[in-house]
Amino acid sequence: MCAERIRRAIATVCLSGTLEDKLAAASAAGFDGIEVFEPDLVASPWSPTELATRCADLGLSIDLYQPFRDLDSTDPDRFAQNLRRLDRKVDVMAALGVDTVLVCSSVSPDAVDDPDRLAGQLATAAARAGDHGMRLAYEALAWGRHVSTWERSWDVVRRVDSPALGLCLDSFHVLSRGGDPAGFAAVPAEKLFSLQLADAPQLSMDVLQWSRHHRLFPGQGAFDLPYFVACVLAAGYAGPLSLEVFNDVYRQADPARTAVGAMRSLQWLEEALALRDPDAGPPLPPAAPPLTGWAFTELAVDGVSGPELAGVLAALGFTHTGQHRSKPVQLWEQGPTPGHRARVLLNASVVRPAGPGVASVAALGLESADPRRSAARAEAMSAPVLPRTRGAAEADLSAVAAPDGTQVFFTRTGPGGWPADFLPTGERPGHGTGITGIDHVGLTQPFDAFDEAGLFYRAVLGLEPQEVTELAAPFGLVRTRAVTGPDRAVRLTLSVSALRRGGWAPGVPEPQHVALATGDLVATASALRAAGAPLLPMPANYADDLAARYDLPPELLTAIREHGLMYEEDARGGYLHLATDVLGDRVFFEVVQRIGDHDGYGSADAPVRMAAHRHRRRP
Amino acid sequence: MCAERIRRAIATVCLSGTLEDKLAAASAAGFDGIEVFEPDLVASPWSPTELATRCADLGLSIDLYQPFRDLDSTDPDRFAQNLRRLDRKVDVMAALGVDTVLVCSSVSPDAVDDPDRLAGQLATAAARAGDHGMRLAYEALAWGRHVSTWERSWDVVRRVDSPALGLCLDSFHVLSRGGDPAGFAAVPAEKLFSLQLADAPQLSMDVLQWSRHHRLFPGQGAFDLPYFVACVLAAGYAGPLSLEVFNDVYRQADPARTAVGAMRSLQWLEEALALRDPDAGPPLPPAAPPLTGWAFTELAVDGVSGPELAGVLAALGFTHTGQHRSKPVQLWEQGPTPGHRARVLLNASVVRPAGPGVASVAALGLESADPRRSAARAEAMSAPVLPRTRGAAEADLSAVAAPDGTQVFFTRTGPGGWPADFLPTGERPGHGTGITGIDHVGLTQPFDAFDEAGLFYRAVLGLEPQEVTELAAPFGLVRTRAVTGPDRAVRLTLSVSALRRGGWAPGVPEPQHVALATGDLVATASALRAAGAPLLPMPANYADDLAARYDLPPELLTAIREHGLMYEEDARGGYLHLATDVLGDRVFFEVVQRIGDHDGYGSADAPVRMAAHRHRRRP
């Protein structure tokens, strides 16, 4: 690994839109080069020469032309026709100024099986391309008819032994079949022509469909891309890290956003590589400082929802302890000590789309061991840093925007920290109803942002994405995943409607929530009920079903029935929780007691909770 | 098969929403009964007794409670716990007034493999249920741990030999594994407790995921449901035909619409069954009369798009031949004889959402051998029949609404037919530019309507859905399928964005099109160009790629380049076509020449055409 930065490329097929849209997005995100996906060129009004000029103007190299399909054939006439087709594409490549074309292993019924004959045909093709200064990068498609492993493609390339024929290694094709990248060490560096990178979730499905629809950017899926790339680099590959992701969501999403997320995936990958070999490579971005807890959660409210939320916070046991010096923001606190305290800001200054009663999670205030370094890290990882309007006595709060628009503040709660922005009301936080902190915040994601968000929290904040769970919710399938700090001091849950939530259904979008922590939910629930908190009633059938499934203590079951609690358990412990009504248009509170080492979020109960929310809102 | 109508049921899991939404939808669509899916009851505020009352009020029986999972266990304590769980569910069933519970084969690691031990545990459970007058319907899940075929489930039921234990046969579980329903004949009728029906597309994926996300209603997929059900009925099953469809789209779609489509699927299935055995069963709905061609296509226009479309029709070689007697509708015609004539109506009277320049396909006029019978058929198949405002001299046009809202008219073009509604302008249609009819109409479907539409055209109009094709289009994956008459006198193409088309992209929704037929596209294109028709320019790269892929005659290639033609071919023939610009906001014309017996629609060219349309609209 040389000390210069590795070049970064992206295949145009990764991005939605026409070629113009794709180039603009790749350039703006800072890519060095592109792979030209042939159908994008075919559909473009630019001639190859015009495309080359346009790329040069944008500072983009063209690193690969791709793909050339079904080259070899047992039918000599067909093979001759395929060579003529190759000649035409070599003309296109010359006009583009690119010297390498990706040749996929054939999927055709007439594909050549015999290794000698296959090598002979590839040698012929390589010689023709080589005469024009072009090279063929041969790639084993995981579903190739006879060549479907990288070892088999290497066997062919080795047999041909032509400087115009080398390998294209594609992480999806290798890893989807369980291939071992350690074997790359046997390939001479000069035979490694091209490298294509894609991650993917671990799915049990036809590999072609998996590849065409569900690829992800590195760090978004289940593959070990750092190890894969380390093996390729160790074998001497010196070309660009190039992304090739076929994904149904990205295929229709804003390409400018996709490209930024794609760039972040390479930054994350390069950092993971550098951490394997700290002496090599250019300087790393600042490491993500540990996030040690929640400073606050900020809710955006308006003139209708603000008083409603304030009333609910009071009933939840919170105290209005501070008023912002320059903005209409209230600080509400609860908890016996600063280390066991939940803080909620009600912010009536956020400019929101019209509509009375809006309420949503506007910002997450996270305790960072080094807020300035957190912000520098975020900026280095292409996170949009937000402008702040500061008053004289206001703390320097660094904030970035998450993919769903939520503001993420890096801060420290202490003298000179953000609380100095608030003038004390004179009230002090107390034990309240037994709430001692924020367990997690649940953010419903825009349809296009779910996979992007997982990598955002991973690469920018250093949180770890957990497994994706699917819920059969009343109004459509919901996918959800947590992102957490190593010691769970910070937990977020991200959820998204897998298709979209039916237009007929009420209460779109799904509400967000703030989950407050308690050590004794039964006691807290009693206190909440006494204080008139708007607890969501749960159906008696739900408690009956719990009684059928679990051997719960009778007094707990009584409390579950009385207060509308929800419960689930696994081998690690139990999760006892309750929800309030939806407040304003799209936020509610949960109160959560974790029993033992339970690490879940009540996702099995979520469909029942959603139905209960629906019943409360039915006209 | 008895002469009474078979009862029709639907599992609540088929429908989106809460239990109240589902019951209302099932009742309104005319179902006789439901299967209660346990999670729907658990999430409901109704007690089981209240649910029973509500169902009775709606005229719905409760035919099955489902599912009970993981009954058997190699762990005696766990099995004892499972029996207690069953006891609780028997209490629920008693309150519901249902006597049968679906017991799925276990998927648990502790599932019992030994047939004798498994039979012993099921016998114990059946005896406990039987003591309360309840029955267990045992179903082999296709992914059951040890019991995954219906034969294996029948082996267990046979061994137990209890009147309280029988089979549930589910078409998905049997057919997804390639099971043969002919074997049902060996099962005594009294052991056939329950029947669940689902269709599915032929997919190559994990069977659990296939089942949970991609099931379809009968007639929407690739399974031979009529044969399956015929085998079950031949074995003596006398219970309801009950639908159990897990589908991600229906899970979030308007349940009232889903239920109507579900009912139509059973009507279609029953008709297919009756046609196998014409002497049995109640009277059939009127058969769909043959649709022998296109009478007209009607475009809705406004004050801006109307003159634009009229100008384009003139340039396409059409003549304004008639004016509607009572409405602002123009008739435009082209073609040498009535049998070789294309007719387009421009209707400025349709009430449309606001916006200047709207233009869309409002109605399809189809030639029916018996228009009144076509309409009666449609009504019998739950198609919404549209009210018509008739003037004195206006023909009796029967129309129904397709799932996307397009009006479908059944008519005959001839004396006394619909043309009598139009006062002649004095102009006569001529040879024009060589257009001789309508090849097909392309309708972009609302996201939720694609599978529903396929069965609508199949069951209501007697058209045959063809294979679903996926297109990697510039703004997202598009699925498309044709529905055609047996002799291709009527062709429609239906397309839908597989997820949704990115909100960032221009020109949403995708335009519809009317494809006009010619016998000589090169000649027609020359004439169109001379007349100033707004032909869509195609990129030179596209023609270059055609030249690389096909050995086309040089003069054809020249015409392709000159006129912006598109071409694709397969073993059956070629498809040569061109497109106009998008007119108004969402419609364009194609002109099509079919060569040989080509049966496609240029779908491989569609992404290039979409990119070209995007380029024309780029600011």
Image (tube, coloured by chain):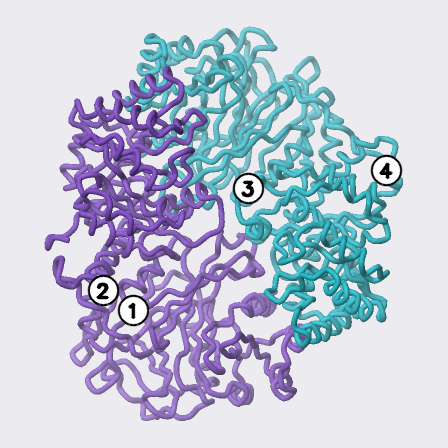
Chain colours: A purple, B cyan
Mark 4–mark 1 CB contact (< 8 Å) = no
Circles 3 and 4 on the same chain:
yes
Label pair 2/4, CB-CB below 8 angstroms = no
Which dot, 2 or 3, sits closer to the camera?
A: 3
Instruction: Tell me the chain of label 2.
Output: A
Q: Chain of mark 4?
A: B
Q: Is residue B567 left or right of residue A120?
A: right
First-in-chain label (3 vs 4)? 3
Mark pair 2, 3: CA separation? 42 Å
Q: Which mark is residue B282?
A: 4
- Contact (CB < 8 A) between labels 2 and 3? no
Asked if the residue under mark 1 is in contact with the one under mark 3, i.e. CB atoms within 8 Å, the reply is no
Locate residue B244, reporting x and y percent.
68, 51
Which residue is drawn at the image coordinates 69% and 59% (left, top)?
Answer: B104
What residue is shown with label 3?
A: B203
Q: Is residue B231 above or below residue B188?
A: above
Q: Secondary structure at mark 3?
A: loop
Find numbered disc 4 in the image and state the secondary structure of the residue it sits on. Answer: loop
| Kind of element beneath mark 2 | helix
Asked if labels 3 and 1 share a chain, the reply is: no
Snapshot quadrant of residue B532: top left
- Mark 3 and mark 4 residues within 8 Å of each other at the beta carbon: no
- Find the distance from the CA under tag 2 to the CA under tag 4: 70 Å
In the picture of the structure, the residue carrying the numbered disc 2 is: A378
Tag 1: amino acid: Val
